[in-house]
Image (tube, helix red, strand yellow):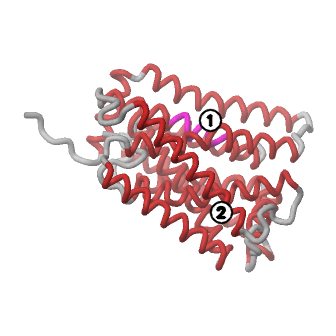
Amino acid sequence: MPAPVHVGMSTRAVSHARRRLFGEPEQTAVDASRAALAVLTVAFAGLYATGTEPTLRTQMLVYLVGMVALNLPHGGYEHFSNLRRRGLPFGARYVALYLSFVVGFVGLFVVAPLPALALAFGTAVAKGGHGDLHVMDALVGTDHLVSRPQRALAALVRGGAVMIVPAVAWTETFYGFTGYMLTVFDGRLVGPAASSPETVTTVLGAAYGLGVLLHLGGGLAAGGGVTESWLLDAFETLLLVAFFVFVPVVIAIGLYFPLWYSLRQSARSMVVEEARPSRTEGVSVVMAWGVLVVGALVTALVATSLWVIAPNPLAGASLLPGAVAFYTIFVCIIALPHVVVGEWLDFGRGIWYVP
């Protein structure tokens, strides 16, 4: 009988070996995510070099297409993939807990919009960073991350690129849409974030830069020098930073989730399915279809309820910026239980499962 795999570096090494064994379509998806962000980064850097910048209207349209049409369905698939072999009692508890978090988060936005939005931004960091860490486990390699603090810092750096970097690089636009989002629930910025946003973003940027250096430097030292996994990590980390520096924040966030997060999580799912050959165990086609339809209807019900409850669903703005603000709040509300219930409280598997 083979020796049990120790949870930690050994598990990650096994996952990396699995990628090498049958990773062609999976690796293609990961390569596509890198290529998409690299092309967009170079393209927008070139635009700025010529003094050209897309209009805010164009940016908002790209955001809505990316987040609504391309990314939203993937969130439902993550839950379906996680639950389809778990049985009805577990699934019912999962859904009930998920909806409880949704109701609680909506209530927090009603009574305390600013803390709720801060929690929402933190959730985006956790989703981007923690989710990406598991993709690294399955497909990129994490042999250079040998301790829990290193892994936590890696997740913070990866996820921090999604919120901290655009806040520094696109301060005016970032704070402008933050204001819209708060207005949906009659909230407003207070304290240093309102009186001196540049100072706040400068401090955040300095702290984030230090985090990047510690993450890459620590990985280099722990891995015993330059390794393949460290090189790939360094490349992807710096690519994420460059992407959010050069691509306007509204477009960057709108395209990051479908072109990076969802594409890479789909690749991770392929690896997991290869390790579980009975792909439809316990689930008929009709049942699978029904679950997805019910999930879509529940998602629409959450959006409709939010529209009714919010004092200013369009944030007192015109249709396009109001729609961006409302939809972003909606995504934030369903993202919190997505991470907390779908992964952190699911000790048996979780939406980012890597065997």
User: Which label was assigned to residue 259?
Assistant: 1
56 lies above or below 44: below
Name the spot of residue 295 as percent of width and height, x first: 52, 47
**Residue 95, image quadrant:** bottom left
Residue 213 visible at all:
no
Residue 261 lies within the magenta run = yes
Give the residue at the far right of this rendering. Answer: 51
- The amino acid at mark 2 is Ser
Query: Image quadrant for the C terminus?
Result: top left
Q: Earlier in the sequence, mark 1 or mark 2?
A: 1
Q: State the residue at coordinates (69%, 69%).
A: 309
Instruction: Give the main secondary structure of the magenta stretch.
Output: helix
Residue sitting nearer the eye, 191 or 294: 294
**Residue 125, image quadrant:** bottom right
Q: Range of the magenta residues?
A: 255-264
Disc 1 to disc 2, C-alpha distance: 29 Å
- Judge depth for marks 1 and 2 and give the one in front: 2
Residue 355 lies within the magenta run = no
- The residue pinned by badge 2 equals 305
